[in-house]
Image (cartoon, helix red, strand yellow):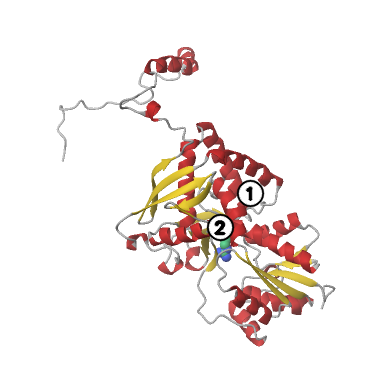
Amino acid sequence: MTDLAGETCVLAYSGGLDTSVAVAWLRETYGLEVVTVTGDLGSVGELEAVRQKALRSGARRAVVLDAREPFVRYFVWPALQADALYQGRYPLATALGRPLLAKLLVDVAREEGAKYVAHGSTGKGNDQVRFDLGVAALAPDLKVIAPLRSGMSMTRDEEIEYAKARGIPVPVTKKSPYSVDENLWGRSIEAGILEDPWEAPPKDVYQWTVDPGDAPARPLEIVIAFREGIPVSLDGAASDGVTLIEKLNAIAGKHGVGRIDQIEDRLVGIKSREIYEAPAAVVLHTAHRAIEDLVLSKESLRLKQRIADEYAELVYNGLWFSAHHQDLAAYVASTQRFVTGEVRLRLHRGVASVVGRRSDNALYSISLATYGKGDTFDHKAAEGFIQVYGLSLRNQAKRQALWSGDAGIPLKLPSPGKKKRTK
Ligand code: ARG
């Protein structure tokens, strides 16, 4: 026993073996009283069963919360509006969930008057950073304990032994060879055979998406409507965010859409191979970009893309509760005032293609764009435009003659007809 004995520690509890063992381990190692908190972000399943499991693992109190709605409203939608994809691809499902779980952890710690909080992340990943910094930003006085980083090192078999000896329920199903994290916005899968970046992911990696090769031969067309950058309906039926995402995960998953196979750079400096399944996220990011293309100016789109990368980076790196985030979010929110309209997509064998978009705020003008009748563009004015636009280039060409006549591309092309083609 230690000087922590009798103190309360609030543990982020998933219901899995690691965190169940951690309940007992925190009690036995430090003499802590453990209160667990489980936030359902769309994957926990039967909440009451998780609560009972926490209690059977030795928790003094077990809190379970359905956090799906706030997850979508305060985390998923802002990241979608920002077009935030880490290293251009990962929609950040896990990374967006952690700050919310950190917030729930802090809330329960305050309720309990606890000085300690704990989580089950290891010392090699990004999630430890997101938990630690989430708590640090919201409640700098709380101390974070991460058992898997500080002494609770057991193999899976040892954990099962440890659990059995204490009457903690152990999983009956065979352990998946992968490490998986899931919420509404996506499934993250790593480890096992996936650690070899040359190995194609085996079939059992995927649970939300069918193999594009086995997906229906006929494409499915869907329409998503956005209001100020937030998806509000699917095929004309208004929908709350949670339902819309659940529906899209099912529909797009059936068409094999949403698989991502990525080598990514963790914050701690490790390259890792990650598989993601994120059917709704892939469809919605594609659709959101499509409507932005229609309504935002070229300059907005250009800056917004840079902000998107920066935003994704800070979310990935655990800096959700930072001033930098508030500032970027304010910019993003402002850009979204025009992002209202509809996008038509075709889902087919692993691909979500945009096939149509419309908006009352569209900057697209058919009378300017058309090559057909009704053209209002002043073709003559183009000459003057190019005259001024090319002024400095023309000046440079005269003074500095950067390019010789053959432009550095000395081509001798056979003239047609002279030489016979060899078959
Ligand atoms: N690499 C992703 C991230 O850092 C996912 C990590 C998910 N954790 C897991 N146990 N698979 O956001």
> Residue 179, which numbered label?
none
Whether the residue under disc 2 has CB within 8 Å of ligand 1: yes
Residue pictured at 45% horizontal, 19% vertical: 402
Foreground of the two, 200 or 325: 325
Instruction: Please say whether residue 212 is visible from this viewpoint.
Output: yes
Q: Quadrant of the C terminus?
A: top left
Identify the mark nearer the N-term, 1 or 2: 2
| Disc 2, SS | helix
The quarter holding residue 94 reads: bottom right
The residue to which callout 1 is attached is 314
Residue 357 location, x and y as percent? 41, 42
Amino acid at circle 1: Leu
Amino acid at circle 2: Ala
Residue situated furthest right in the rendering: 3
Foreground of the two, 356 or 189: 356
Dot 1, crowdedness within 10 Å: few (<14), some or many (≥20)? some
Residue pictured at 85% horizontal, 73% vertical: 3
The residue to which callout 2 is attached is 93
Residue 182 location, x and y as percent? 54, 64
Instruction: Please say whether residue 261 is visible from this viewpoint.
Output: no
